[in-house]
Amino acid sequence: MSEHKTITEGRFLRFVDVDGWEFVQRTGSSGVVCIVAVTTRRQILLVEQFRPALNANVIELPAGLAGDLEDSEESLETAARRELMEETGYEAQNWTHLCNIVSSAGLTDEIVTVFRANRLRKTGPGGGDESESIVVHEVDLDSLNSWLNDAAGSGKCIDSRIYGTMTFLEMSPCQSPNKVINTQRAE
């Protein structure tokens, strides 16, 4: 059995040692979600926000933590729906679980659950919660690579999950390796 030792803990992170390997764990959440949201106009929703760890603006897919608010038992799908609305102002009728990915296996035990959101409808302002200042970008899929290159050329960082999930954008819903897990009528 592995020995698990907490080295130090802050408000949001715990630094641990397991059998001589040091890494970081999140505290106060039950998981991480990431959303690949594509509009009927074939535009992917991306968000941009300043990230102090990089001292730069970062282009990302909408994402966030599950169970970090009042509901510590929040499901990953519920968190994905909430984060999409908070960050972009969009709701989705169809949700598909695409995959689970590892953030950085040498640094953290974090696993990100990636959802695809389809049949989108703009119903709110987006921009994040009161602690965030998020800019929403609706980027044509046909020009995504050049758009990302331009963003990187202007000094913005690009989150690797965008590149990692671009494969799924090339699949039609019936080619997706996973089934639609929930269909909800957007109101």
Image (cartoon, rainbow, N blue to C red):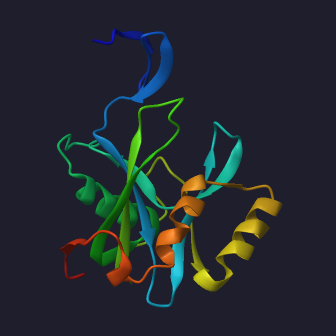
Image-based side of 64 in relation to 127, left or right: left
Q: Where is residue 109 in the image (x, y as percent from the top left)?
A: 41, 32
Q: Residue at x 76, y 60 (%)?
A: 152
Q: Which residue is drawn at 19% across and 77% down?
A: 184
Residue at the outermost bottom position: 41
Residue at the outermost right position: 153
In this rendering, the answer to whether 150 lies above or below 118 is: above
Q: Which residue is drawn at 70% across and 68% down?
A: 148
Image-based side of 96 in relation to 124, left or right: left
Which sits in the foreground, 92 or 113?
Answer: 113
Location of the N terminus (image quadrant): top left
Image-based side of 186 in relation to 49, left or right: left
Quarter of the figure with residue 77: bottom left
Which sits in the foreground, 41 or 108?
Answer: 108
Q: Position of residue 5 (x, y in %)?
A: 37, 9
In this rendering, the answer to whether 115 lies above or below 54 is: below
In this rendering, the answer to whether 41 lies above or below 67 is: below
Location of the C terminus (image quadrant): bottom left
Quarter of the figure with residue 51: top right
Q: Residue at x 71, y 41 (%)?
A: 55
Q: Position of residue 154 (x, y in %)?
A: 81, 61
Which sits in the foreground, 83 or 178?
Answer: 178
Does the image show residue 119?
A: no
Count every numbered label the image shows and give the total: 0
Image-based side of 162 in relation to 168, left or right: right
Q: Position of residue 108 (x, y in %)?
A: 47, 31
Does the image show residue 73?
A: yes
In this rendering, the answer to whether 8 lies above or below 81 is: above
